Amino acid sequence: MNKQTISDIDVSGKKVFVRVDFNTPLSSKDPQADITVTDDTRIRAALPTLNYLLDHGAALILASHLGRPKTADDVQFAMKPVARKLEEVIGRPVQYIPAVMNDKVKQAAADLRPGDILLLENTRFHPGEKKNDPQLAADFAALADVYVDDAFGSAHRPDASVDGAARAMRAKGGPAVAGFLMNAEISALSAAVENPPRPYVAIMGGAKISDKIKLIENLLDKADKILIGGGMANTFLKAQGHNMGRSLVEEDALPEAKRLLGLAADRLILPVDVVTATEVSAGAPSEVEMVWALSPDKMALDIGPATLERFNAELQGAQLVVWNGPMGVFEVEQFAHGTNQLAQMLAEMVDHGAQVIIGGGDSAAAVRAAGLTDKMTHVSTGGGASLELLEGKELPGVAVLDGK
């Protein structure tokens, strides 16, 4: 996965089509309201790439998806508020055109001069985006001299702006390279796939195991230990014969859980105690119960102190830790303790020389909420993409880029 980046090519005087990840949270979905960006993390994450290109004499054509629009003109997902926020954080004018591809887009791109920025409409407004339509891909490539992908969060999707446009750019003899954010993601995550330092401990959480069966199988081949928390631990615990009360359990996944437990031997570490309550709410009375003595009317909503202690013991001496998925319902403060404490443990490990990679999605949100993002070795911007890469899958948006 050693790919060329923007620092490997000459962009002076060139028009550069940059696939960015501006899929940002918005203040409202009411098209009559003044919709604003409420978290500009992803926009700021693209700034090193965008500023490098601008500082080296390029003109930029930016494309991103935003949300999951149901129609081709779902105005609640228009890019206008993103354009305003980008203009604010980058300190330059941003031309926004409310169209993905038409004659106005083509003319605007043709008129660009070094230092200019053009932001296209939400790529998912065009029916050809999700279909990886060759004509749309060719039209994207025709706007520019260079293709840059800096949207790791979309790298697992073979869309026209991700896969097709890069292929079309290469077909016409132009470079298709990674931005700095994409390169950082590839470098960090591929280290866990190709030649991980040891001991290597993986931590898996979140609600379901059905979404992560392939990942767990791949990790069993690579990691020395896998620590399991969150809702997915309930299914494993029930597969071991524990009565999980009213806890979330994937009944259909029990056979797979039993199979994975058989493959893992003693390398898969499950909770020994959990924080329980009768309902998922901030005011619900909660208590700590051992997993073999769970009250039949209770739900497991977080890992308990004995489990945290055991996880901490398993993490000692690890040189690489990859974490994907919270340890409980971390959105509710009283069930966030296990996730927050784990994040603190990992931050301290980094201080002592370990590499800690946070695999995006809810894990990244939890680390950010705890104020520990800067304490980790790497926090991925791509939940689904990071999962698939860690599973050992080839990501279309990475595979298509020029190699070194």
Image (cartoon, helix red, strand yellow):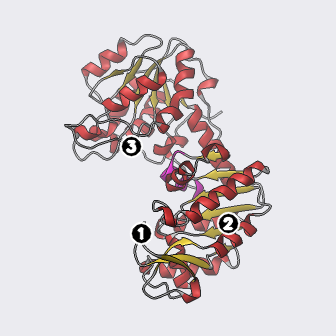
Q: Which residue is mark 1?
A: 283
For residue 111, what is the image quadrant? top left
**400 or 118, which lies in front?**
118
Q: Which residue is mark 3?
A: 25
User: Disc 1 marks which amino acid?
Assistant: Gly
Q: Secondary structure at mark 1?
A: loop
Q: Residues within 10 Å of mark 3 (few under 14, many from 20)?
A: some
Quarter occupied by the N terminus:
top right
Start-end of magenta stretch: 381-391
Alpha carbon distance from label 1 to label 3: 27 Å
**Above or below 27: residue 402:** above
User: Disc 3 marks which amino acid?
Assistant: Pro
Alpha carbon distance from label 2 to label 1: 42 Å
For residue 8, what is the image quadrant? top right
- Residue at 70 percent of width and 73 percent of height: 267
Query: Does the rendering let one see residue 397?
Result: yes
Alpha carbon distance from label 2 to label 3: 36 Å
Q: Secondary structure at mark 2?
A: helix
Query: Does the rendering let one see residue 172?
Result: no
Left or right of 76 on screen, residue 14: right
